[in-house]
Amino acid sequence: MANPINIAFPLRKGSQGAFETNAETIQAVADDLRILILTNHNERVIHSDFGANLRGIIFEQSDNIGQQITDAITSAVDKWMPFVNIIDIIVRDERTDPTVKSNEIKVELRFSVNQIEGVLQIPIKA
């Protein structure tokens, strides 16, 4: 295996002991983005504003929840991972996609780093 870049997320046992790691930059960035998006404010010691803080948005009853989620993700990425270029964010809920459950939102994030594109799909349950 090539030199590891970071620990893969979610944590899982590696084939050579310890934890599974990422050897490709785009996968390492995707895992870091997943952690950033799924983290809410005040979950990290010292960095209380780390994360996209989506929990509060998801529980709101709003017609523009997709835009609020997009804005929160964009703001978090701009602050904490400015080297990532967001190409597109698609937010799906039960109104826009019949495969999405009523207590769930699916986020698809297309991004690039150093002209290499990646796609991240994150189901978020309320």
Image (tube, rainbow, N blue to C red):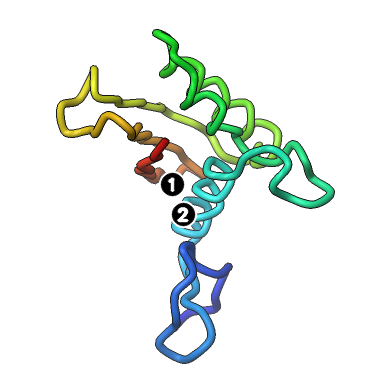
Q: CA distance from mark 2 to mark 1?
A: 7 Å
Q: Residue 40, how many percent across, how many down? A: 62, 39
Q: Residue furthest left?
A: 98
Badge nearest the viewer, 2 or 1:
2
| Point 47% across, 42% down: residue | 115
| Point 44% across, 17% down: residue | 65
Question: Mark 2 is on which residue type?
Answer: Ile
| CB-based contact (under 8 Å), mark 2 and mark 1 | yes
Question: Mark 1 is on which residue type?
Answer: Ile
Q: 78 or 52, which is in the foreground?
A: 52
Q: Residue 77, how many percent across, how many down? A: 61, 35
Q: Is residue 45 above or below residue 71?
A: below
Q: Residue 76, how many percent across, how many down? A: 63, 33
Q: Residue 88, how many percent across, how many down? A: 40, 27
Q: Quadrant of residue 96?
A: top left
Quarter of the image that includes the C terminus: top left
Q: Is residue 6 left or right of residue 21?
A: right
Mark 2 vs 1, N-terminal side: 2
Q: Which mark is residue 25?
A: none
Quarter of the image that includes the N terminus: bottom left
Q: Is residue 86 left or right of residue 50?
A: left
How many other residues sit within 10 Å of disc 2, few (<14), some (14-19) or many (≥20)? Answer: some
Q: Residue furthest top?
A: 63
Q: Which mark is residue 116?
A: 1
Helix, strand or loop at label 2? It is helix
| Point 56% across, 27% down: residue | 56
Q: Residue furthest bottom?
A: 16
| Point 51% across, 79% down: residue | 19
Q: 8 or 103, which is in the foreground?
A: 103
Q: Is residue 39 above or below residue 103?
A: below
Residue position for label 2: 26
